[in-house]
């Protein structure tokens, strides 16, 4: 399973990329606004830190302008995945960019039917938003199970990128279901490392080691 980080914060990206566990980055207009800075420059910097796919989102809503934006964004670096919304114009743009060999991440997916359309439009990634479905009383992870099954039935190449992750359980459930990618907020990724018994066990080992009076180096 690949781990992307869901942020435009360059310090967080540098910090987590240094673990060797980050396979890509996703951004969206809200994350860009939260981070501040010039959109294109921020995306360029991210592409220099991470060699895997970096999602940069179009903001036009009509096909013609979205396609121009997508072609422009794709020129920033070889590892750009152009992000388009799951709308008729978004999927038309997805098809055109994918036919041109450009990676496309179709975002704001909330149903299996939408995910099926994105795969048929040649998306490299589909981003179902689990947290936002949970927020309105639906079962976000059930959508992941459905999309994984549908894509497997037809051997679509589109990767299931679990988005809007809110907690470590979302990541574990996505892994159990065989989702290809989880895009994880930095705070949640850091939570994955932690277990109280690891801290407790390490404290005890270090205390016992100190009592031997030895050093390794
Ligand atoms: C990722 O591509 C999405 O933009 C992101 O996961 C949305 O997460 P949110 O629902 O926490 O804003």
Image (spheres, rainbow, N blue to C red):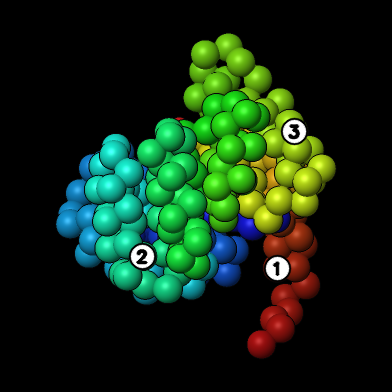
Note whether residue 62 is visible.
yes
Q: Are marks 3 and 1 in contact (CB under 8 Å)?
A: no
Which residue appears at 78% of the width and 38% of the height? 149
- Residue found at x 73% / y 79%: 214
Secondary structure under badge 2? helix
For ligand 1, give the image quadrant: top left
Residue under label 3: 145
Residue beneath disc 2: 74
Report, in whole angstroms, how far the alpha carbon at label 3 lies from the one at label 2: 31 Å
* Residue occupying image coordinates x 70% and y 68%: 210
Task: Work out whether mark 3 precedes mark 2 in sequence or the reverse, and give the earlier one.
Answer: 2
Q: Is residue 178 above or below residue 16?
A: above
Asked whether 132 or 57 is in front, the reply is: 57
Is 79 placed left or right of 159 in the picture? left
Residue 172 to residue 23: above or below: above
Classed neighbour count for the residue bearing mark 2: other residues with Cα under 10 Å, few (<14), some (14–19), many (≥20): many
Q: Which residue is mark 1?
A: 210
Q: Secondary structure at mark 3?
A: helix
């Amino acid at each position: 399973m690949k781990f992307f980080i869901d942020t435009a914060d360059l310090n967080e990206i540098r910090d987590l990329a240094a673990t060797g566990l980050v396979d890509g980055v996703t951004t969206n207009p809200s994350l860009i606004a939260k981070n501040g800075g010039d959109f294109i420059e921020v995306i360029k910097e991210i592409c220099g830190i991470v060699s895997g796919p970096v999602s940069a989102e179009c903001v036009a809503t009509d096909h013609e302008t979205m396609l121009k934006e997508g072609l422009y964004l794709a020129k920033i670096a070889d590892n750009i995945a152009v992000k388009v919304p799951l709308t008729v114009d978004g999927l038309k743009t997805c098809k055109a960019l994918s036919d041109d060999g450009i990676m496309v991440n179709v975002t704001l997916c909330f149903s299996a039917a939408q995910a099926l359309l994105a795969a048929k439009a040649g998306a490299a990634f589909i981003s179902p938003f689990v947290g936002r479905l949970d927020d309105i009383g639906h079962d976000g992870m059930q959508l992941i199970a459905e999309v994984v099954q549908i894509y497997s039935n037809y051997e679509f190449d589109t990767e299931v990128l679990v988005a809007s992750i809110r907690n470590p359980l979302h990541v574990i459930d996505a892994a159990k279901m065989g989702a290809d990618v989880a895009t994880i907020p930095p705070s949640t990724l850091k939570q994955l490392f932690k277990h109280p018994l690891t801290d407790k066990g390490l404290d005890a080992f270090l205390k016992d080691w100190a009592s031997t009076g030895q050093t390794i180096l």
